[in-house]
Image (cartoon, helix red, strand yellow):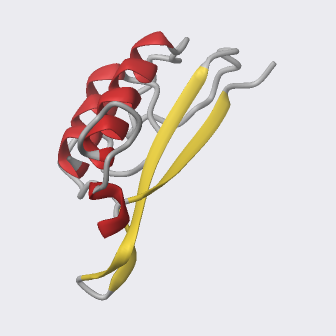
Amino acid sequence: CPTLDLVVVFDGSGSMVKKFGHHEHGFYALMATLKQWVGTLPLSGEKADEPSTTLTKKVRVAFVQYSGTYGGKKAQVAPMGVGAGGRLSGDKDELLADIDWHE
């Protein structure tokens, strides 16, 4: 099996500030859930700047936030130099840094 690449697209608009289940703020609840989820994935260990050249049979993830236009762009990703910089990564620390940036 090849490495599985997942791109997680999530809402960052004003609708996410509403109550979400038992959480008072939906966006923060989502960020906390994504952090926990990343910790359970069988990540490949590959950093974003490393090409995926092996069949790791594991997972790489990228995060994209949609929330209207910001800086002329509708899709927001962590900038280069922060975590994975919005690119696919199998490194837990890079992915958590990306989530922190979105938060």
Q: Quadrant of residue 57?
A: top right
Q: Quadrant of residue 65?
A: bottom left
Which residue does the image show at 34% across and 32% down from the upper left? 95
- Number of disc labels: 0
Name above or below for residue 68 compared with residue 100: below
The reply, left or right, for residue 3 in relation to residue 13 is: right
72 vs 103, nearest the viewer: 103
Q: Can you name the residue that lies furthest to the bottom here?
A: 72
Q: Quadrant of residue 35?
A: top left
Q: Percent position (x, y) of residue 88?
A: 48, 41
Q: Residue at x 37, y 39 (%)?
A: 30
Answer above or below: position of 91 versus 64.
Answer: above
Horizontal and vertical percent for residue 2? 76, 24
Looking at the picture, does residue 68 appear above or below residue 77? below
Q: Is residue 37 left or right of residue 71?
A: right
Judge by depth and name the residue closer to the eye, 66 or 18: 18
User: Which residue is drawn at the image coordinates 30% and 29% (left, top)?
Assistant: 32
Q: Is residue 68 above or below residue 17?
A: below
Residue 26: x percent and y percent?
33, 46
Which residue is rendered at x = 32% and y = 47% of the image? 19
The quadrant of the rendering that contains the N terminus is: top right
